[in-house]
Image: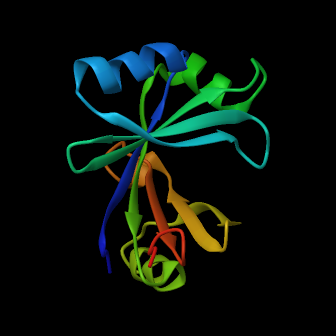
Amino acid sequence: MINRLMKINLRVRSMENATQLMTELLGGQVIFERGANTLGDYESRLFQVADVTFDVGIPANEDSDLAKTIDKLGEGIDSICFAVDDVSEVGRQLESQGVHFVYEAEYDGSRIAFTHPKDACGVKLEFMDGPTANPT
């Protein structure tokens, strides 16, 4: 069902503080500057720390969904993303266990889906298939 841990998504208020944490304190490096997402409500930067990729997102404005989530839950881990062969198949397997996707979308030629944190011990899980999840 799961091929590998793809990335850990973090929500933060300050990219400057997150960059300092990831590079200076943890010894990581910036591997990709994603910029604004397709909805324009957050910006993100990818960091590599040891063998783990972190996708760090900041709200693009105070009315964005990410800003509201940070106001409600604070900064921290937003979700954990797993690369899979087939998001639909993962959805069927999870549904048979009583876990449902609360959000599904196409992204850059791949499919992504998220579970609700209530269904996964308080952690929002993301599953991704396609070329973005499995680069050649």
**Viewer-closest of 66 and 55:** 55
**Viewer-closest of 85 and 30:** 30
Name which residue lies at 40% across and 69% down: 83
Name which residue lies at 65% across and 34% down: 43
Q: Quadrant of the N terminus?
A: bottom left
Judged left or right of residue 105, residue 86 is left
**Viewer-closest of 68 and 56:** 56
Residue 131, quarter of the rendered image: bottom right
Name which residue lies at 79% across and 22% down: 63
**Viewer-closest of 112 and 134:** 134
Residue 33, quarter of the rendered image: top right
Judged left or right of residue 49, residue 112 is right
Name which residue lies at 46% across and 66% down: 127
Q: Position of residue 31 (x, y in %)?
A: 44, 44
Judged left or right of residue 11, residue 62 is right
Q: Position of residue 76 (x, y in %)?
A: 40, 27
Q: Quadrant of the C terminus?
A: bottom left
Render colour scheme? rainbow
Q: Position of residue 116 (x, y in %)?
A: 49, 52
Q: Position of residue 101 (x, y in %)?
A: 55, 64
